[in-house]
Image (cartoon, helix red, strand yellow):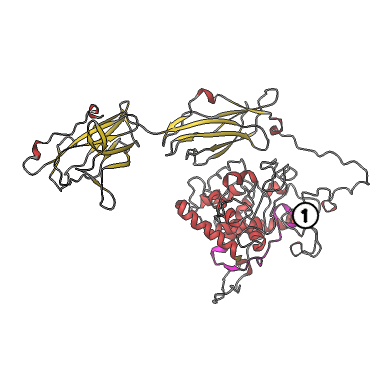
Amino acid sequence: MAAHFGRRLRKGAATTAVAAAAVAALSASQAPGATGEDHGRQTTAGASAPLPDPTGGGATGDSPYYTDLPPLNSPDPSPSPSAGTPVAQGAAEAGIPATVLDAYKKAEAELRASKPGCNLPWQLLAAIGKVESGQARGGEVDAHGTTLRPILGPVLDGNGFALIKDTDHGAYDGNAQYDQAVGPMQFIPSTWAWAGRDGNGDGKKDPNNIYDAALAAGHYLCRGDRDLSREADLHSAILGYNDSQDYLNTVLSWMEYYRKGTYSVPDGTGGLPAHRSGGGTPGSTPSDPHKGKPGSKDQGGQAGPSPSPTNPGGKDGGNPAPKPPGTPAPPPTTPSTPTDTVDHLEDAGTGTTELTAKTGDAFTGTISTRAETKAGASVAKVRIRFTISGDTDATFTGGEDVATVVTDAKGVAKAPALQAGERTGDFKVTATVVGRSVKGVDYQATVTERTADSLTAATGSDTPMTCTPGGEFADQVQVKATYQGAVADGVAATATLIKSAVDPTENDKGPYFKDANGKAVRTLTGLKTDSKGLLTLPKLYADDTTGTFLLRVTTPGGGTLTVQLTVAADGTASASPSPSPSASASS
């Protein structure tokens, strides 16, 4: 990242470059577990590779970030003992605006419940919030956590930054031509489209709301099977957010600083950092409204070294002076990319495979899409986004419902393998071109329930099922399920005490099961065979009615087993018949 942005240092920024090098060195010395020696792409020793963002880049599109480091001394916070507003008696940088701090802690609590194995610390969210937006510009948020003014990163038009063409029609960033990072946690729209969360319960997913953004950042960092208490996973998560070793070192420094102690300050009173990566200052991006205003607190009384991306012809950027009135403006230049040449998408052989799987199984069929020009030529190096929609819990491998794949030399992108969940039904996978409005290709897929076509009495279940009135049966019914002769695991089953072989309705007398409250029930649903295809039913009890009764177990796919039960007084039970495993006993 440092090298990436270093190439963009403008003339006259030599002193900034020297300062940036010093900051990087200090960052490395403060960051626990970070070597600080390689400011290129390499991660720390032992760190795993960052989990790719399904949109094809980091959460922020690797936009600039604040490089200010925490003080070397410990925070040593001392909030006021009164119930009123806390008073900062320790290091000022340890203060976090109240609403912002509350959002981080609420996000940590939610992730502790939904993804306990991730071990997300709120201090990590606070560290990222610090370097991305200065804690929402020092806490400039309303009572619901929404920023009072938009926080936008630079225009990602390929001019010194990544090239990410508009993906949201300007809905989040107000830019219908190129994307910009948005909000206090600086999500680019294409990432927010799948990572966004509703953190404040208002029914909306707003990247400008600190509760929504903090929760989204937490889920983003906890993707896959990460455990952030492990150094390798922690580093991988941070690098996945912004792919820069300097960024990693800076975030680690702030996280460690906040772990040593912090306190709440009133919203709007937090300090705002002053330096950005790439030799810029807050004034060089639209995120600072004071850009170019002499005496601005964050500019040190100086205008930013570069113009706002929305004013590329400004005199502060070192560009030629404006031409005389009446001179026609040159047409805007748009970088040509492979994406620009895509005219349409085509299925690349998916139709020859069947996109059907049973609950819990992996799909054997693969979804493939080809990007083509108007003339039908294949287009390589184009990002194709595959999105799962519909009432299903099916995912791609890794648990995500969005995946982005770059087309190969033949213009083909193959989606990751699909994994069925526990919910049956149809769903859709849509392939679209990232950064270009081209009609997508839809693929229909189906998850079917697991079935068994045969049920038999398991070994050891061939003894007579007998009981005295008011007693309990000594043995439990156990059945084995198979499908086409193979073990049928994970198959749903229903057990019912029926009236007779020709009347499968529930009996209102005779043997029964007990529910959790000890109440008699004669139909059990939600049963499921284990990995060996076995199902052991709960204990059976008898009321005071004597006679012969039937228990029927059924499964999807036609598997049926009818077991005969006898309730008789002592001395007559031995004449009871044994269970009948024959499917012919079913109605």
Q: How many marks?
A: 1
Q: Which residue is at a point 80% across and 38% down the rendered structure image? A: 333
The part of the image, by quadrant, that contains residue 584 is top left
Q: Which residue is mark 1?
A: 14
Examine the rendering and report whether any part of residue 37 can be seen.
no
| Residue 87, image x, y percentages | 60, 74
**Which of the two residues, 254 or 348, is positioned nearer the viewer here?**
348
Q: Is residue 260 magenta?
A: yes
Relative side of 378 to 199, left or right: right
| Residue 279, image x, y percentages | 73, 54
Asked if 453 appears above or below 80 in the picture, the reply is above
Q: What is the quadrant of the C terminus in the image?
A: top left
Asked if 462 appears above or below 239 in the picture, the reply is above
Q: Is residue 382 magenta?
A: no
| Residue 504, image x, y percentages | 26, 34
Residue range in magenta is: 258-283
| Residue 500, image x, y percentages | 21, 34
Examine the rendering and report whether any part of residue 199 can be seen.
yes
Helix, strand or loop under label 1: helix
Q: Neighbour class for label 1 at 10 Å: few (<14), some, many (≥20)?
A: few
Q: Which residue is at a point 49% across and 25% down the rendered structure image? A: 353
Please identify the dominant SS of the magenta region: loop
Q: Which residue is at a point 75% across and 37% down the rendered structure image? A: 335
Task: Say which amino acid is labelled 1.
Answer: Ala
Relative side of 313 to 510, left or right: right
Q: Residue furthest left?
A: 571
